């Protein structure tokens, strides 16, 4: 398996080298807003320790990340009065992964509303407002 690249964009976010709209963090995990949101409230949840994806993660990394995914999925569902939540996770380029630090997408969903296409930059102020709604809905 390819080695973890410490210069990937999420490693830089973790080190504070590039900005991110942070929503929640604990000792093991960080949740922040996706800059190209495919739904309102599109979040990413990552471990603070390095691993590329599910294929090289330890059981402990997976356990802590999935607990934070559940916490943020519940908060996002409440914040957006969503009918449901889509959780996506990709492994290696052939599996659809573009950033090689383990992450789960958390996407609040409304009945009958499709996700937006990938790769469209979101509006910064709108993303910040959505982050605030999710923070307010956290336990
Ligand atoms: P994936 O690796 O799961 O295919 O996609 C990576 C995700 O990271 C995409 O949804 C993309 O919009 C998001 N992303 C890429 N660069 C940045 C960034 O600099 N900041 C944030 N917050 N999200 C990013």
Image (spheres, helix red, strand yellow):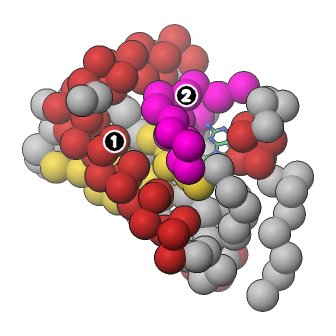
**123 and 15: which is toward the camera:** 15
- Image coordinates of residue 109 in percent, x first then y, are 23, 45
Q: Residue furthest bottom?
A: 1
80 to 115, vertically: above or below: above
- Image coordinates of residue 131 in percent, x first then y, are 42, 23
What residue is shown at x 45% (from left), y 41% (from top)? 43
**Residue wearing tag 2:** 22
103 to 89, vertically: above or below: above
Residue 101 picture quarter: bottom right
For this view, does 110 lie left or right of residue 46?
A: left
- Image coordinates of residue 127 in percent, x first then y, are 48, 22
Characterize the local packing of mark 2: few (<14), some (14-19) or many (20 or more) Cα atoms within 10 angstroms.
Answer: some
For this view, does 64 lie left or right of residue 138?
A: right
- Image coordinates of residue 32 in percent, x first then y, are 53, 35
For this view, does 102 lie left or right of residue 112?
A: right
Assign the C terminus to one quadrant of the image.
Answer: top left
Q: Is residue 21 magenta?
A: yes
Q: Is mark 2 within 8 Å of ligand 1?
A: no
What residue is shown at x 88% (from left), y 52% (from top)? 7
Does residue 91 appear anywhere in the picture? Answer: no
What residue is shown at x 84% (from left), y 31% (from top)? 17
Look at the image and give the residue range highlighted in magenta.
19-37
Assign the N terminus to one quadrant of the image.
Answer: bottom right
**16 and 26: which is toward the camera:** 26
**Residue wearing tag 1:** 72
What residue is shown at x 39% (from left), y 16% (from top)? 132
From mark 1 to mark 2, how far is it between C-alphas?
12 Å
């Amino acid at each position: 398996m390819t080695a973890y690249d410490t210069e990937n964009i999420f490693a830089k976010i973790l080190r504070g080298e590039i900005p991110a709209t942070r929503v929640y963090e604990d000792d093991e995990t960080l949740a922040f807003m996706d800059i190209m949101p495919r739904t309102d409230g599109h979040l990413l949840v990552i471990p603070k320790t390095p691993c590329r994806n599910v294929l090289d993660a330890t059981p402990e990394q997976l356990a802590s990340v999935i607990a934070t995914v559940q916490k943020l999925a519940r908060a996002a569902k409440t914040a957006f009065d969503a009918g449901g939540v889509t959780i996506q996770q990709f492994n290696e380029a052939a599996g659809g992964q573009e950033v090689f630090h383990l992450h789960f997408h958390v996407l609040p969903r409304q009945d009958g509303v499709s996700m937006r296409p990938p790769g469209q930059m979101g509006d910064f102020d709108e993303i910040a407002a959505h982050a605030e709604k999710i923070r307010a809905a956290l336990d």
